[in-house]
Image (spheres, rainbow, N blue to C red):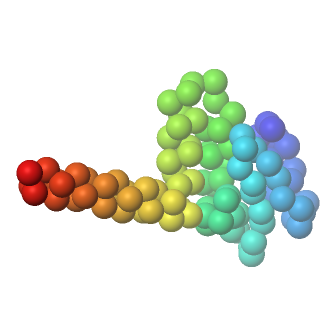
């Protein structure tokens, strides 16, 4: 998926989702694009498409983290890690 194809998809106002790098993009509203249920404005979504198409794996990981942050997955991951750390601390404290 190139940037030109992305801008063409946005300009057509297609109701069909677009797949980029394993993520689904869907147009909602005037300037709002949903990426895996996370809301991005057009400029952010364009930057995200650039990042997902990058050859650099760190840039692609950063794009995934941005998506996780916007759709709430990153918060769940952080809470799960905190719970896991608390369980380990409690188990070691009992010994």
The quarter holding residue 60 reads top right
Residue 67 screen position, x and y as percent: 57, 54
Taking the spot 51% from the left edge, 65% from the top edge, the residue there is 72
Residue 20 screen position, x and y as percent: 75, 44
Residue 54 screen position, x and y as percent: 64, 30
Q: Residue furthest front?
A: 95
Judge by depth and name the residue closer to the eye, 29 or 71: 71
Tell whether 36 sits left or right of 70. right
Residue 44 screen position, x and y as percent: 60, 54
The answer to whether one can see residue 50 in this image is no
Judge by depth and name the residue closer to the eye, 44 or 67: 67
Q: Residue furthest bottom?
A: 29
The answer to whether one can see residue 88 in this image is yes
Judge by depth and name the residue closer to the eye, 83 or 64: 83
Tell whether 90 sits left or right of 49. left
Quadrant in which the N terminus appears? top right
How many badges with numbers are in the image? 0
Task: Decide: is 49 above or below 18.
Answer: above
Q: Residue furthest top?
A: 55
Taking the spot 61% from the left edge, 38% from the top edge, the residue there is 51
Tell whether 32 sits left or right of 77. right
The quarter holding residue 11 reads bottom right
Taking the spot 69% from the left edge, 34% from the top edge, the residue there is 53
């Amino acid at each position: 998926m190139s940037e030109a194809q992305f801008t063409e998809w946005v300009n057509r106002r297609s109701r069909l989702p677009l797949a980029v790098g394993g993520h689904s993009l869907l147009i909602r509203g005037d300037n709002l694009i949903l990426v895996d249920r996370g809301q991005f404005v057009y400029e952010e979504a364009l930057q995200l498409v650039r990042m997902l198409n990058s050859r650099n794996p760190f840039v692609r990981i950063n794009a995934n983290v941005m998506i996780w942050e916007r759709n709430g997955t990153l918060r769940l991951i952080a809470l799960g890690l905190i719970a896991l750390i608390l369980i380990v601390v409690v188990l070691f404290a009992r010994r």
